[in-house]
Image: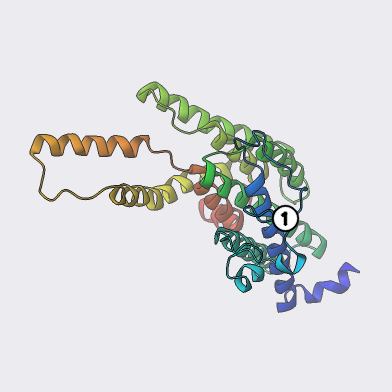
Amino acid sequence: MLRDLEPLSTTPVAFGFAVLLGLLWGSFANVCIYRLPPTEEFPNGRSVATPASHCGVCKTPIKWYDNVPLFSWLWLRGQCRACKAKFSARYLIVEAATGLLFGVAWWMAMVPNALFEPFETRLIRFAISAAFCFVMIVVAFIDLDHRLILNKVTIPSMIVAYAASFALPGGHWYDGLIGAAIGYGLPWLIGEIYYRLRGVEGLGLGDGMLLAVVGALLGWPGVLVALFGGATVGTIIGIPALLLARRKGGPEPLAPAPESEASDAAGEAEGDLMRAELPFGVFLSIAAVFYLFAQPWISVSFRLPGA
């Protein structure tokens, strides 16, 4: 039966199905992002299964026709039908991003490998890539909101990622183990050195757990690309965002400060930036997804294993 579906795998219908599947999983990603982190009312987070979707303000259950991914937010204009409370545009962004990444995952699994892998293997490759993107989105948005990377997300994901690596051709049983060990150990070592030098924490252990997930599936090259790629993305995006946020935090002085005061202010500003807690998991997730799709080109270009 799968052989009969293979001719459809590169048609717009197949891509549309992959995107639709991503939108549905994006809706579930929103549930995970909202319910899994701890709060004062729910220190251990909440179940992602119960209760059913409801408005966070008036608690009115959301009808099925108001729970259609992407489109519901648009036709309701981002507000609850019952109490008119505003829904964050974050829901729309998460669903759209998940749908887009599922579409890319389908194309990357089906088109470049059409002459080299059987259709069944390409379906498995799509499923693994799509699941990896889903986890990265959940981790990234939770870290963006709460500055947390949850073990209850990363530990099961690491186990599943390592098991999934056996379903793909060309790997070895030890690749994922080495990748996970380096993924966790390298951030721990960097954080330990930073703490010894400056007396404050650098990379958190949550970042190490996230990189362990990356390493379990993509091996140690994926860890290196995610770590240094994430640092690059964080520098490009994070530092300007911090400067902009600090600038908006208070009015500019009407006249230049004396040299000594200006020096003190510059030192304080530098200290604020150095102590600022960036959601590094966001940048690691972006770099990891980039490597997931760019792995063949990177492996060939830089002669890394895993091509």
Q: Residues within 10 Å of mark 1 (few under 14, many from 20)?
A: some
Q: Quadrant of the N terminus?
A: bottom right
Residue 252 pos. (x, y %):
20, 50
Considering only vertical position in the picture, is 91 above or below 232? Answer: below
Question: What is the quadrant of residue 300 in the picture?
Answer: bottom right
Q: Quadrant of residue 295?
A: bottom right
Q: Is residue 84 left or right of residue 279?
A: right
Q: Please, is residue 127 above or below residue 184 in the view? A: below
Colour setting: rainbow
Q: In the displayed orientation, state which residue is furthest to the left.
A: 258
Q: Is residue 304 visible?
A: no
Q: Is residue 49 left or right of residue 56?
A: right
Q: Residue furthest bottom?
A: 12
**Mark 1, residue position:** 53
Of 118 and 151, which appears nearest the observer? Answer: 151
Q: How many marks?
A: 1
Report whether 148 appears left or right of 233.
right
Residue 289 in picture, x, y percent from top left: 58, 54
The relative height of residue 300 versus residue 259 in the rendered view (above or below) is: below
- Residue 254: image x %, image y %? 13, 51
Nearer to me, 11 or 157: 157
Q: Amino acid at mark 1?
A: Ser
Q: Residue furthest right?
A: 1
Determine the residue positioned at 70% across, 53% down: 131
Q: Secondary structure at mark 1?
A: loop
Residue at image position (72%, 41%) is 162
Residue 56 percent across, percent down from the top left: 64, 52
Visible in this render: residue 45?
yes
